[in-house]
Amino acid sequence: MSDVIIRIDDVYKQYRLGSIGGRTFQEDVKSLTAKLLHREDPNQKVGKEGGAVKRNERFYALSGISFDIYRGDTLGVIGQNGAGKSTLLKLLSRVTAPTSGTISYNGRISSMLEVGTGFHPELTGRENVYLNGAILGMSKSEIDRKFDEIVEFAELSQFIDTPVKRYSSGMYVKLAFSVSAHLDADILVMDEVLAVGDVRFQQKCLQKMGAVATDEGKTVLYVSHNMATIRQLCNRCVVLEKGKLKYDGDVSGGIEAYLSSQDTTQRVYNDFSNVKRRYLKYGGRAMLKSLELIGKYNNYFVNDEKLSFYLNCENHEDTEELHIHFIIKTMDDIPVATFLSPDVFSAKKGQETRFKVTLDISEIVSGNYKMDIVLVKANPVCNFIHYDTVNPALCFTKELSLGTTYTITWKTQDRGYVQGKGIEIEKV
């Protein structure tokens, strides 16, 4: 691990904004005339905010990036969209050159930056294996030796003599990844191409990349927005933010640094005081006041991690036999789980009640969710009277490691979603 295989030293990558070429001769004459007369260019582009984008304006996709990559590293590269991740990988793959700074190598690189890079749609899968392998630097004898292994891993033996223009995007990924993974390279570069494949093949690819690093001692660079795969595959992580290196270290710290850079407003602590209610049928006799996540700096949950928070309620008159109802929905308002506090509680006028709530969300699949909270009272005929509703009270992200399976233990309800039994709630 002390052997440096890639050294990135003070690398900058600059791009020019605005249109470059592609204009008519007449437009160029008008622009030149306006420039000579010191007038506004009639053909300059207008930005989203209403400001003009000058043709010679410069933009730095990377600004002074410096770090070393060691032989045997499985390095996760993460960051928000536009942070410079793909630009960095293109520089490492020599697709483009840095504006300034140096990148030195001590090994052979195999890159997979886009689905089907190097594939010709009119050629068969077999022919594209040889074409793609040649682009990646493999000799014909090397491809011959590994051809059967490549096709077997891609699971496309039945279609290997079919033109790839008839392949699905998933079939493209399988074949392209298989060629890249079986190249005798020292460094394997992957730019989140696995998102197209099915879950089983994604897991197979991750296992292959892990084996490439641990068993064969090769170096893997992997860009992904899926933090679960970063945790599963990588032993080191770098975080890019606005073209600069924000973090370089262990995976857990990298993920925390990445998530902390995102907008966490109304996530860790949510104040409901100024939230506009859709209705308060019973005059706000009891109201939800605030929610605060316990032991979290963001709203990101992984695998079996439970959703724990403090919930404050305030009473404007004496109330009895109150329940709290929690409904978890997808971002397009499809309910996936509901929890109801098992015991009732009462409160006096002017009293604020604080609860510690823990919800078992382990059966929820990966995705973005929101949670509604409803303060209700059970009437004598067992119907609920809604005192207050906050929609949504919390938004959160759930991630599962690929290959994770659960045994469903929740009881299916006739309303089309599941009722969670895993709720713990107590006054504090």
Image (tube, rainbow, N blue to C red):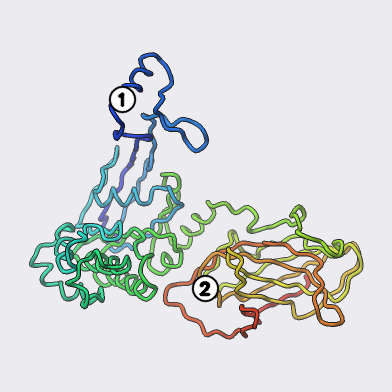
Q: CA distance from mark 1 to mark 2?
A: 56 Å
Q: Residue at x 76, y 72 (%)?
A: 324
Q: Position of residue 74 (x, y in %)?
A: 34, 63
> Which residue is nearer to you in this view: 294 or 24?
24
Q: Tell me, for residue 365, which label it has, or none.
A: 2
The reply, left or right, for residue 6 in relation to residue 394 is: left
First reached walking from the N terminus: tag 1 or tag 2: 1
Q: Position of residue 49 (x, y in %)?
A: 52, 36
Q: Position of residue 214 (x, y in %)?
A: 29, 70
> Which residue is nearer to you in this view: 350 or 117?
117
Q: Of helix, strand and loop, which one carries label 1?
A: helix
Q: Which residue is label 1 attached to? A: 26
Q: Amino acid at mark 1?
A: Gln
The reply, left or right, for residue 71 in relation to residue 290 is: left
Q: Tell me, for residue 268, which label it has, or none.
A: none
The reply, left or right, for residue 359 in relation to residue 145 is: right
Q: Residue furthest front?
A: 26
Q: Is residue 199 above or below residue 115?
A: below
Q: Are marks 1 and 2 in contact (CB under 8 Å)?
A: no
Quarter of the image for residue 70 reads: bottom left
Q: Position of residue 43 (x, y in %)?
A: 39, 28
